[in-house]
Image (cartoon, helix red, strand yellow):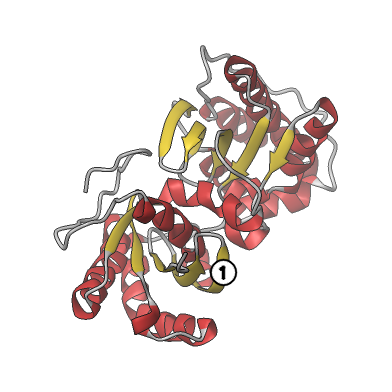
Amino acid sequence: MKDILTLGIESSCDETSIAVVKNGREILSNVINSQIKIHEKFGGVVPEIASRNHIEAISNVMEQALKEANISYDDIDNIACTYGPGLVGALLVGVSYAKGLSYALNKPLTGTNHIEGHIAANYITHKELKPPFICLIISGGHTHLVHIKDYDKFEILGKTRDDAIGEAFDKVARVIGLGYPGGPKVDKLAKEGIPNIELPKTHMEGLDFSFSGVKTSIINLYHKNPDINKADLCASFEKYVTEILINNTMKASKELKLNTIALAGGVSANSYIRENFMELKEKGYKIYYPEPILCTDNAAMIASAGYYRFISGVTSNLELNAVPNLKIGNNNQ
């Protein structure tokens, strides 16, 4: 069987990334141009600035990705690009670039869902992982509990009713003065603290999540007592959200009778969350998560997800457009 080389393009937020992946599992290159330093002074991503920087960076990133993979344009079998969800201006840069390449090179184009890309990151790190399994996607924009029935078949079991978990991390960090991006900074400071602060529990029906209550509680605690131990506050916050994540995932596991669980998304790089999920191995669960570089936004995960869409017969025409609120499992292009 001929190897399939997929060129992945990711520009949904503040990373301009292009990668080449062989057969959906082997990275030949994965170049990531991050804008974190640019947006740090604003305390978050500024969409217009993100779009402008994608335009400036994408051609150089492309050149570097091909060079590192040691291939030419002719070697590419499929072009996969993120077309949603994300910031519409940022998405349009990658989609437009991918469509131009597809037309100029006469290569197939596969519009790819960013969330499905996060799931696929696990296939790169864990060559043995195959559906079915449960995936907990936790990032700055998403908190989804998903039943992965097959490489291209997904069922959402639960999702956040308000803030995404990464958004809650960022807001907590901002309020207590840690800055942006909040997730890694909260994780680092929490290691110095003790989870000894009681936080109000939010009880949701089913497998949905809610993080606005705990976020507001921490903000109120800090405003009433600015001298509160920040490390203890971060540790208590991490413990609280991790318990929610594990409880819902365990419920889903029992309902579906599946003991294979994967984590995905930027927040899955959090050390406390990982350690607590890994403890489930002692109860017979198989736990997977991508290596840290594949937890953040990157094009290798898009190439992997795009590969599985491509071999299942899904391709896009040149009318493909950005869909900022794209839902997982949506194959309409």
Q: Is 198 rendered above or below residue 218?
A: above
The reply to whether residue 279 is visible in this rendering is: yes
Q: Position of residue 240 (x, y in %)?
A: 70, 28
Tag 1: amino acid? Ile
Q: Is 203 rendered above or below residue 27?
A: above
The reply to whether residue 227 is visible in this rendering is: no
Q: Position of residue 37 (x, y in %)?
A: 53, 71
**Can you tell which quarter of the image residue 241 is in?**
top right
Q: Is 181 rendered above or below residue 288?
A: below
Residue shown at the point (58%, 34%) measured from the top left = 133
Characterize the local packing of mark 1: few (<14), some (14-19) or many (20 or more) Cα atoms within 10 angstroms: many
Residue shown at the point (63%, 50%) measured from the top left = 183
The reply, left or right, for residue 96 in relation to residue 194 is left
Residue linked to disc 1? 27
Which element type, helix, strand or loop, lies under badge 1? Answer: strand
Q: Position of residue 304 (x, y in %)?
A: 48, 58
Comparing 210 with 108, the one in front is 108
**Can you tell which quarter of the image residue 87 is in?**
bottom left
Q: Position of residue 249 (x, y in %)?
A: 63, 26
The reply, left or right, for residue 284 in relation to residue 295 is right
Residue shown at the point (23%, 56%) measured from the top left = 316
